[in-house]
Image (spheres, rainbow, N blue to C red):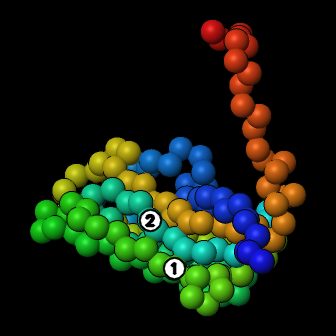
Amino acid sequence: EGTARKSVYPAWFDVQQCGNSGYDLAPGKNVTTGEFTLGFAGLLLGVGGHLYDFGEGLVLANATRNEDVAALASKLDPAGRILSMPIATFVERGGYRLNQGEKMRVTATYDNRAGKPLPDGAMGIVVGYFLPETDAHMSALRREPKKQGSVTARE
């Protein structure tokens, strides 16, 4: 008797809604938010975050339930450079339940102390591990590996 293996997938929550992830940073305080509707149900097992320098933190929230999922406050040096980002895990409570159709919100907060605009100076992404309710939903997203010896129009 063993535990059945399950596939875990990356979950990507980007304030730019998975378009071009970088964006301009104005001088001073900047708060940028993106929202998504979940296409799949399952469990979020844990998350970490990605910010650029001057990034103070990220908040992942379930807008449908009006609750914060994770608040990730960065550690910055005196010049505003990122030293570290925390991670949040939900495994001890069985994961954070995500339901198909729920709206999720990610917010990135920056304090640009450079005194000038920084083109493409910001990014705000929460990345986590997602265990889908059913692997069948995720299998439709898999790409077949390129066959050896195959040639595309660009090659």
* N-terminal label among 1 and 2: 2
- Within 10 Å of disc 2 (Cα), the crowding (few <14, some 14-19, many 20+) is many
The type of residue carrying mark 2 is: Gly
- Residue at which label 2 appears: 49
Vertical position of residue 149 compared to residue 44: above or below: above
Instruction: Name the residue at the right extreme.
Output: 136
- Give residue 147's quadrant in the image: top right
Quadrant into which the N terminus falls: bottom right
Q: CA distance from mark 1 to mark 2?
A: 12 Å
Amino acid bearing label 1: Thr
Q: Residue 92: percent from the left, percent from the top?
A: 57, 88
Residue 116 placed where, x, y %?
22, 52
Front one among 48 and 107: 48
Left or right of residue 122, residue 27 in this image = left
* Residue 63 locus on image (x, y percent): 67, 80
The furthest residue to the left: 78
Q: Is residue 146 above or below residue 92?
A: above
- How crowded pointer 1 is (Cα within 10 Å; few <14, some 14-19, many 20+) is rated as some
* The quadrant where residue 16 appears: bottom right
- SS type, badge 2: strand
Residue bearing the label numbered 1: 89
68 sits left or right of 153 in the view: left
Q: Quadrant of residue 28?
A: bottom left
Name which residue lies at 64% across and 82% down: 95
Figure label count: 2
Q: Nearer the viewer, residue 76 or 5?
A: 5
